Image (cartoon, helix red, strand yellow):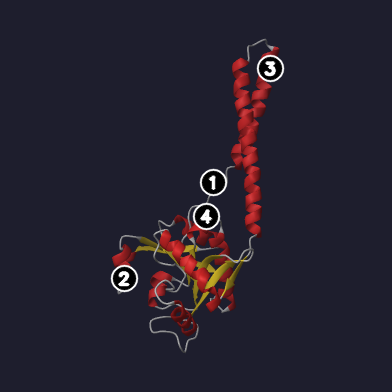
Amino acid sequence: MKEAKSINWLHGKKRYLLWGLFAFGIICIVSIVLTESGVNLDWLTTISGIGGTLTVILSIMTTILKKYRKTAKKVEIELVKPQKEHEAIISDFIKEHVKNSEFEIHGGALVEKVDYDVWLEQLANNSDKSTVGKDWVVASTFLAIRKSDGKLIGMIDIRHELNDFLQSYGGHIGLGIRPSERGKGYASKITVEGLSFCKKIGLQKVMLACYKDNLASRKTIEKCGGKLEKEFAVSEIENFPICRESSEDKLVQVYWITI
């Protein structure tokens, strides 16, 4: 799971606005008392003016943030099974990753590795236990499309069960967000939709894993109810050399979500 840090940097900072208002009130009271005492208050007037200005600025920014969050909550995402008609938007999705020096599409079930028609055939085979490939498990891959404009925001791969590798490292859900749409809360929205599908296919607990240094993914998982089960280095995974070669010193965290 991959998502850049949230741009909502004011999150949790409302207390500063309250403290600002409190301080401004104290300054006003002190200035009145000192004025009555005949003290020169030029310096206090300057401080009061600065404090008042900062309070107004914080108030405006908090209002803007509330409007942004309200708008973001209204954005609707739908999970759609990939079809031939989606080839163009998926191609654009892949190109954006490559332009961002990312050559692996998380949640894409290897869409970047093969011809599009071959990929669709693989998805069809992997969706049925009688045709799923060797060393693979039954899985459903979805496009996460924004309803308002039809833009492909991300992809999510949901495994119906876990094999040895997935139980150690991969988990039930693989998710990726396109670079230009990260930091906007889409990962959480798509994960919630994915968990809803997991419940429909009979799963009661869902495993998700991410690198410990991927703070955005960790926050997304925890926001969706993930409870940390364990942590280990990729180098500890036996019989999976491809993982050790790529990032053997990385730490992996495994979470479970009860649905």
Residue at mark 1 to residue at mark 4: CA–CA distance: 11 Å
Pointer 1 residue? 9
Q: Quadrant of residue 31?
A: top right
- Looking at the image, residue 37 sits to the left or right of residue 116; the answer is right
Residue type marked 1:
Trp
- How many residues crowd around disc 2 within 10 Å: few (fewer than 14), some, or many (20 or more)? few
Can you tell which of label 1 and label 4 is closer to the viewer? 4
Name the residue: 31% across, 70% down.
242
Residue at mark 1 to residue at mark 3: CA–CA distance: 38 Å
Report the quarter where the C terminus lies.
bottom right
- Looking at the image, residue 165 sits to the left or right of residue 154; the answer is left
Residue at mark 3 to residue at mark 2: CA–CA distance: 73 Å
Residue type marked 3:
Val
Pointer 4 residue? 183
Residue at mark 4 to residue at mark 3: CA–CA distance: 48 Å
Q: Quadrant of residue 59?
A: top right
Pointer 2 residue? 242
Q: Is residue 254 visible?
A: no
Pointer 3 residue? 33
